[in-house]
Image (spheres, rainbow, N blue to C red):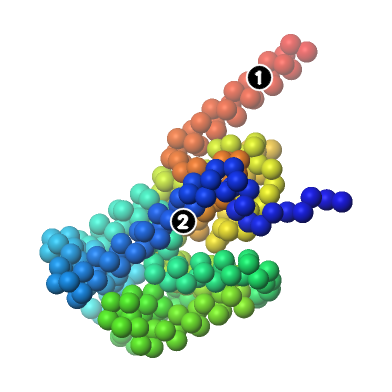
C-alpha cells in the first residue's frame, strides 16, 4: 500500500516549525493590514498618515501614490491628470517594476484575504471543480476596462471593482461591498479555484504586465531536493508558473520563476519542507545557471575529447 499523503503544509511544520512554515503568509497579512491601518488612523484617531484610497493617496502630505490602471482609465475617459497624480504613477511604476507588479495582489490588495480564505477552505473541504474560464480571460477583461472609458467618457470599471469597493467599505463602512465580497468568496469556493484573482481580475492582469522584468523573484534554487509532495502546487495561486522552474533542469530551464503572473506571495517557500524555494535576484540566478550550464557543457566536451 502507498503512503498516505499528509495534509498540505504539515511536513513543513514538522520540519521547520509552525512560525517558519507560515512566515511569508504572516508578513503578507501584516502588510495588508498595515496598508489599511495607515488609512484608518485618520478617520478613527485623527492622525492622517495616508489620505485618499488605493486609487490615489497622499502620504504624510508629501508622497503621492497613484494607481496606474486608474489613471490610464481616467486619461482614456478624457480627464487631464494633475501633476501630483502623474508623479504618483511614476513612483508606483518604478516600485512595481523593481519588486514585481503582482506583489500588489498578494501584499496590498484587501480582496486577497477573501480569496485566500476561499482557497484554504476548498483544500480543507476537498472541493474540486472544473471551470471553462481560462487564465487569459483576465486580460480580455483588462482590455474591456480600457475600452469602456473611451466609449462612455467615465471610469465604468470602478463602479464594480471589488478591490476599490472593499477598500472603501473597510474605511467608510462596507454596505454593498459585503455583497460583492461574498460573491467573490463563493465564486472562488464553489465555482473556480482562484477564480477571481487568477482568471478574471483586470487589476492583477495590469500589474502582471508591469512586473515582467522585475529582479525580485522566487527561485527553486534547490530543486534537486524536491520530493514531489505537491504542496507548493496546492497553495500557489498561479500554480502553472512553478513546473518550468522546478522540473525544467533537463530542458535547460533555469530555477527562476520568471512568469509575470507569479505574485511573489512566498507560500511555496513556506510549505516546502525541503527548502527548495527562496526569494532571489532573477538576473543573478540566471547568470549562475548559465555559468553552470556552460561548465557542464565544457565537462561533457572534455569527456568526449578524451574518449
Pick out the residue farthest to the top: 306
Location of residue 233 with respect to 278 vertically, above or below: below
- Secondary structure beneath dot 1 equals helix
Task: Specify the quadrant of the image occupied by residue 164.
Answer: bottom left
Q: Position of residue 137 (x, y in %)?
A: 55, 72
Quadrant, the C terminus: top right
| Count of residue discs | 2
Q: Is residue 152 left or right of residue 12?
A: left
Which residue is disc 1 drawn over? Answer: 299
Label whose residue precedes the other's in the sequence (1 or 2): 2
Location of residue 267 with respect to 191 vertically, above or below: above
Q: CA distance from mark 1 to mark 2?
A: 42 Å
Q: Is residue 42 left or right of residue 112?
A: left
Crowd band around label 1 with a 10 angstrom C-alpha radius: few (<14), some (14–19), many (20+): few
Location of residue 95 with respect to 70 vertically, above or below: above
Which residue is disc 2 drawn over? Answer: 25
Location of residue 81 with respect to 156 vertically, above or below: above
Tell me the residue at 17%/71% (across/down): 45
Q: Is residue 106 left or right of residue 198?
A: left
Pick the front one: 76 or 23:
23
Q: Is residue 58 left or right of residue 153?
A: left
Tell me the residue at 52%/73% (across/down): 196
Q: Position of residue 78 (x, y in %)?
A: 25, 80
Pick the front one: 205 or 62:
62
Q: Nearer the viewer, mark 1 or mark 2?
A: 2
Tell me the residue at 42%/63% (across/down): 105
Task: Specify the quadrant of the image occupied by residue 149.
Answer: bottom left
Q: Quick check: can you spot residue 139?
A: no
Q: Position of residue 182 (x, y in %)?
A: 48, 82
Tell me the residue at 35%/59% (across/down): 31
Amino acid at each position: 500500500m502507498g503512503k498516505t499523503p499528509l495534509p498540505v503544509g504539515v511536513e513543513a511544520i514538522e520540519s521547520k516549525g509552525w512560525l517558519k512554515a507560515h512566515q511569508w503568509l504572516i508578513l503578507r497579512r501584516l502588510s495588508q493590514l498595515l496598508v489599511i491601518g495607515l488609512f484608518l488612523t485618520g478617520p478613527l484617531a485623527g492622525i492622517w498618515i495616508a489620505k485618499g484610497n488605493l486609487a490615489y493617496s497622499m502620504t504624510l502630505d508629501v508622497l503621492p501614490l497613484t494607481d496606474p490602471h486608474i489613471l490610464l482609465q481616467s486619461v482614456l475617459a478624457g480627464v487631464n491628470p494633475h501633476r501630483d497624480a502623474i508623479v504618483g504613477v511614476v513612483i508606483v511604476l518604478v516600485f512595481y517594476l523593481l519588486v514585481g507588479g503582482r506583489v500588489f495582489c498578494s501584499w496590498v490588495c484587501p480582496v486577497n484575504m477573501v480569496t485566500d480564505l476561499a482557497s484554504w477552505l476548498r483544500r480543507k473541504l476537498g472541493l474540486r471543480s472544473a471551470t471553462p474560464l481560462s487564465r487569459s480571460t483576465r486580460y480580455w477583461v483588462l482590455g474591456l476596462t480600457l475600452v469602456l472609458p473611451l466609449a462612455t467618457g467615465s471610469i465604468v470599471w470602478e463602479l464594480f471593482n471589488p478591490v476599490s469597493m472593499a477598500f472603501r467599505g473597510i474605511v467608510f463602512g462596507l454596505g454593498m461591498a459585503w455583497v460583492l465580497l461574498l460573491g467573490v468568496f463563493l465564486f472562488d469556493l464553489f465555482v473556480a479555484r482562484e477564480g477571481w484573482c487568477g482568471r478574471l481580475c483586470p487589476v492583477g492582469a495590469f500589474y502582471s504586465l508591469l512586473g515582467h522584468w522585475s529582479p525580485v523573484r522566487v527561485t527553486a534554487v534547490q530543486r534537486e531536493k524536491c520530493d514531489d509532495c505537491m504542496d507548493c502546487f496546492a497553495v500557489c495561486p498561479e500554480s502553472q508558473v512553478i513546473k518550468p522552474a522546478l522540473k525544467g533542469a533537463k530542458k535547460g530551464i533555469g530555477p527562476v520563476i520568471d512568469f509575470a503572473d507569479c505574485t511573489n506571495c512566498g507560500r511555496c517557500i513556506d510549505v516546502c519542507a525541503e527548502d527548495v524555494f527562496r526569494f532571489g535576484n532573477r538576473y543573478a540566478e540566471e547568470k549562475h545557471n548559465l555559468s553552470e550550464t556552460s561548465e557542464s557543457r565544457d565537462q561533457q566536451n572534455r569527456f568526449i575529447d578524451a574518449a
